[in-house]
Amino acid sequence: MWNLNIWILVTILTCTNGYDRKCPHSSQWNFTSRSYECSDQKIYICLFDAIKSYASKAVFTASCGPEDLSREGFRYIVTPDLHQVRCTASRYQPFTFTTNGNSQCVLSKSLCNARGQILANNGISSTDRSCRCDYTQNYDYVIPPKDPCSCKPAEEDCSCYVRKCDDDKEMIADYRCLKRVETILPEDIKCPIINRIIPPEETDTVYKIQWQSVVTGSRTWSKQASVILIVVVIIYTVLIGFLFFSVPHVTSILLKSKLELSVKIKENKFVILNGDNVKIECNVKSYIPVRSVTWQNEVDGKIIQITPSTEKYEMDFGKRPSLTIHNFDAEDHGKYRCIVRNVIGMKNEIFGSCLNYMSTFNWLTKLVKVLQQIPAFHTEDMMYMTLHTYDIDLQSKPTEYNAYKGNDVTMDYDDQRKLIAVEWYKEGDKRTKLDVSNEQYSGGVPDNPSLTVRNSKIEDAGIYVCILIYDNEERKTSSFKLKIIPQVKIHKAILEHRADKMFLWPAICDTIDKQMQQNNIVVITGREGTGKSKICLELALFYDKNDYMIIKVDLSENYTIYTDIVHALLIIDDEKYTEDSLNDFMKHHSQVLLKRYIKVILTCSDLYLDIVKSVPEMNKLKNEAFIDINSCLTVKEKEKMLTKYMKVNNIATSASIESNFKDPVI
């Protein structure tokens, strides 16, 4: 790039005779001064001569003399003595002016005419102009300057872009977005309100005379020089077009959630579950390699530059630049965007050097300024990803629903307010988002937030969470507990047992429960009529209240293997199994009982106890897992049960009152 610019500049300077330069450029000063053969005590001086110049012609006087210095913001002219005058309105001198190598103030003032820029301050003869972004047209700084009210183009990037406020808000002078109905005092606005500042015209007669001849003076062009100039202009046009089209574009911005629990409110606007890890990706179109990627977060009108942090932020600068935010929480909310740059634009040093070198040639200076205004990136296609947080409260009691296996069940949510987003999740080892478009479900959308589970299966049981987002972006979560009843018969038996007011929870049930917690399987033995089935129902009622599925297993013929369920109590009754079927059942279940929270109660009459113990997996059980209930009731339990029976049936007396309750027959 540098060689191309030098070649073009040399071609123009050596092959054209556009006008007669009165004073040499500073880079040619030493070369010109040799022809004057000034003594060691004197130097070559070339300055504007205010005496000899007239309206249509500027005259410069060259001579040998001592070097003179003027203070900042001033230059020398000949009147006929050397005289200090201020710099012209379009130039400034931030350091001491010297007659050795200079005929005018060194630097041109910034134009503040890039997209969205306006003039903030004209500066003085020793300082550059300052610019600011036009907030009245919703322009804001791409990179916030030190002073948001006044950006210095020579020291900072003063590029602007359109930052739209919400529909009910407008941008104020310090670039914050406030609601139109809010009242704010002038002293609370950090920047002054924009008053259009017009750059002063060149009123310096010397300057007008000096450059009038350059612009309107005679130009002697050779035919060859004209052809070369046309070729150079074509090359520059193609070059400028290539450079503009080479500026990188952000074509889209995507969000990925580690837990996959983000909720989309609208395009590029999401709510994230507290504690989730989110990854924002930028799709970039750039014909040449990307040089740098910058991430920003805008919160309440304030732009925060994001820097990599192993604990919070992780950045990837590959083909698809990305920002990962770990453990997302309320403090991370805001509008995120990526700014991608390549080697084009940036007001780089090459164009700056060209501008200084050609400052004497007005039309070439304008050409280089066009190159200098090539943006580092396209502000019009910068995209925001707006993120907020939500939390799920599982501490409050969920709304409970029961359904028989195979039936449809609807978890109702009734709210008349307008919704813009609804998401349903199911709790488990991992919280998963439900695909409500699946034929298994109906509803679960803003128009119908209630969720219906069709043809319910055992695995549909569990805790469900619904996240609702209203049109004012208020967020609400509700939880539901769905219980699937796999068998109608055993469920009805449990309900009947619950209604039995005469049965009491005997101490033996505590013993059985303790052994099930330790071994996951218990064998209840006893002769016929000792109440094995009744105790099974009492335990089933207890486990049902603790969200276990109650399944009665028949191993006598085409039996089912229940290894794919969780939180279940399996009851196997007398005479519903054989030695082979029980052996097969235990082979499949012994390895999954603990990790899938499956409990097994097997009832066995005294006559079949040896058959049960002959099964290898059953024989491994401790003796405590075999519980004999032939004499399980205590005296007090018998007395309470009989008293309750008499009370329920209105029996006033009984011969048993005088009996010995220790008699095992009773």
Image: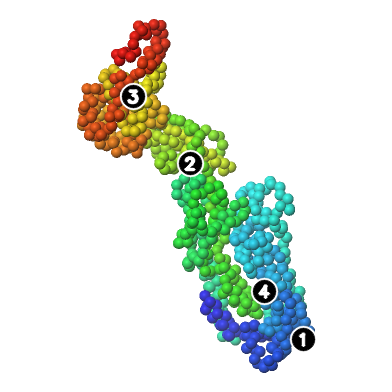
Instruction: State whether residue 196 is above or below residue 357.
Output: above
Look at mark 2 in the image and give the residue it sits on.
423
Residue at point 66%, 69% (across, down): 111
Q: Nearer the viewer, mark 4 or mark 1?
A: 4
Which element type, helix, strand or loop, lies under badge 1? loop
Query: 66 and 504: which one is in front?
Result: 504
Looking at the picture, which amino acid does disc 1 mark?
Lys
Which element type, helix, strand or loop, lies under badge 4? strand
Q: Which mark is residue 536?
A: 3
Which element type, helix, strand or loop, lies under badge 2? strand
Residue 230 placed where, x, y %?
A: 56, 79
Q: Which mark is residue 106?
A: none
For marks 1 and 3, the one nearer the N-term is 1
Q: CA distance from mark 1 to mark 3?
A: 123 Å
| Position of the C terminus by quadrant | top left
Q: To which quarter of the image does residue 361 belong? A: bottom right
10 Å crowding of disc 2: few (<14), some (14-19), many (20+): many
Residue at point 74%, 77% (across, down): 71
Look at mark 4 in the image and give the residue it sits on.
108
